Image (cartoon, coloured by chain):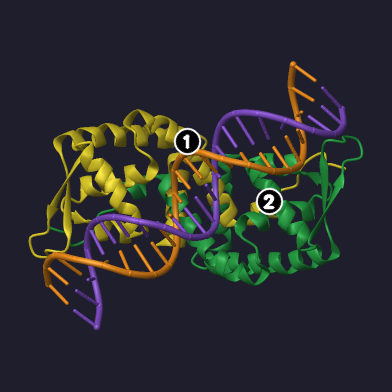
Chain colours: A yellow, B green, C orange, D purple
DNA sequence: TATTGTTATACTCTATAACTATA
DNA sequence: TATAGTTATAGAGTATAACAATA
């Protein structure tokens, strides 16, 4: 026998379940709208951090975003190949690489971040401005 | 040059970014504490839905949890092999499989859900009971 | 003709080990 | 001796195509 209505009552009492479902829902739309920039969420995060933190190192990117170094190499390489970022040897530490957005990278990110802000508005359309602020504050109380 | 302090200001204005970070933080602890039951988050969700919806079909599980049918087969097969669930041919629809938790499965889920509830309390310890309720309500406004 | 479940398989994402260059 | 970056590779997670059985 199947069931008429699936009872998700218990799972919906869990913050982890709800946070994951909400994140997945937003990421789906993110993927669609960022396809024009050929940026996955992780590429967007990496570009945004380099954009707002010129000279940030690969290690700092990994620590901030929870990416493992071997998995960042390919991403940064691809972004450099596309002419969106530059890699320079760090001036004080010859082991590290300093990352910068190129003019093309900056132009792309200005557009991409505007799309992200619009997407944010659309995806939280059922929330008031106050509720959206509250939601973000409560989420940060969990992971920060 | 590296940067002294990484500015994550822009990313932190995005609900999607915050929801994902919060979800990942909770899931990390979930993995640790559910290891004793040998249940990943997806296994827990599947077991919980079968537990609270006896007779639910594979198709209903897939639709509810956003899992693709080919990827559910192995999970259900493993849970059956462990003696936690039973699979029966659906009585009205010979194509479908009805799923039920065994006594062992029910006993396991009573324990596992108690651990999930405790984990919930621990992970949201910086939130008041009201804030936790608000957080869940706002997240559901996004994905439901 | 459509749907449920299944198999096989490809693709992506994430994780581990080991190496180099530098500190 | 430790750290930043890199390479190669393994493992986990997710996706598509095609099929049998049933509706």
Residue at (69% x, 66% y) in the render: B112
The tally of labels here is 2
Residue B41 falls in which quadrant of the image? bottom right
Chain ID of residue with mark 1: A
Residue at (71% x, 44% y) in the render: B61
Question: 10 Å neighbourhood of mark 2: few (<14), some, or many (≥20)?
Answer: few
The residue lying toward the viewer, choosing from D12 and B66, is: D12
Indicate the quadrant containing the C terminus of chain B: top left, top right, bottom left or bottom right.
top right
State the CA–CA distance, disc 1 to disc 2. Answer: 34 Å
Q: Is residue B48 visible?
A: no
> Is A90 displayed left or right of B77 in the figure?
left
Residue C9 falls in which quadrant of the image? top right
Give the number of the disc on residue A102. none
Classify B114 as above or below A75.
below
Residue at (33% x, 57% y) in the render: A70
Q: Residue furthest left?
A: A91
> Is B9 displayed left or right of B81 in the figure?
left
The x and y percentages for residue A136 are 43, 50
The x and y percentages for residue A62 are 31, 58
Query: Which secondary structure, mark 1?
Result: helix
Chain ID of residue with mark 2: B
Give the number of the disc on residue A123. 1
The x and y percentages for residue A43 are 33, 43
The residue lying toward the viewer, choosing from A51 and A143, is: A51
The residue lying toward the viewer, choosing from C21 and B92, is: C21
The x and y percentages for residue C20 are 19, 66
Classify B16 as above or below B26.
above
Classify D16 as above or below A133.
above
> Is B103 displayed left or right of B128 in the figure?
right
Residue tagged 2: B74
Residue at (33% x, 42% y) in the render: A44
Query: Which secondary structure, mark 2?
Result: helix
């Amino acid at each position: 026998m199947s069931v008429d209505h699936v009872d998700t009552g218990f799972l919906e009492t869990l913050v982890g379940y709800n946070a994951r479902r909400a994140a997945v829902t937003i990421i789906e739309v993110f993927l669609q709208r960022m396809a024009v920039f050929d940026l996955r969420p992780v590429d967007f995060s990496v570009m945004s951090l380099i954009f707002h933190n010129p000279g940030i190192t690969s290690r700092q990117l990994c620590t901030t975003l929870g990416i493992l170094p071997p998995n960042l190499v390919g991403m940064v390489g691809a972004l450099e190949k596309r002419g969106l970022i530059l890699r320079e040897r760090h001036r004080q530490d010859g082991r590290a690489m300093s990352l910068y957005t190129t003019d093309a990278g900056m132009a792309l990110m200005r557009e991409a971040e505007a799309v992200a802000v619009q997407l944010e508005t659309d995806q939280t359309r059922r929330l008031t401005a106050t509720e959206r602020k509250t939601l973000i504050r409560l989420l940060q109380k969990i992971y920060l």
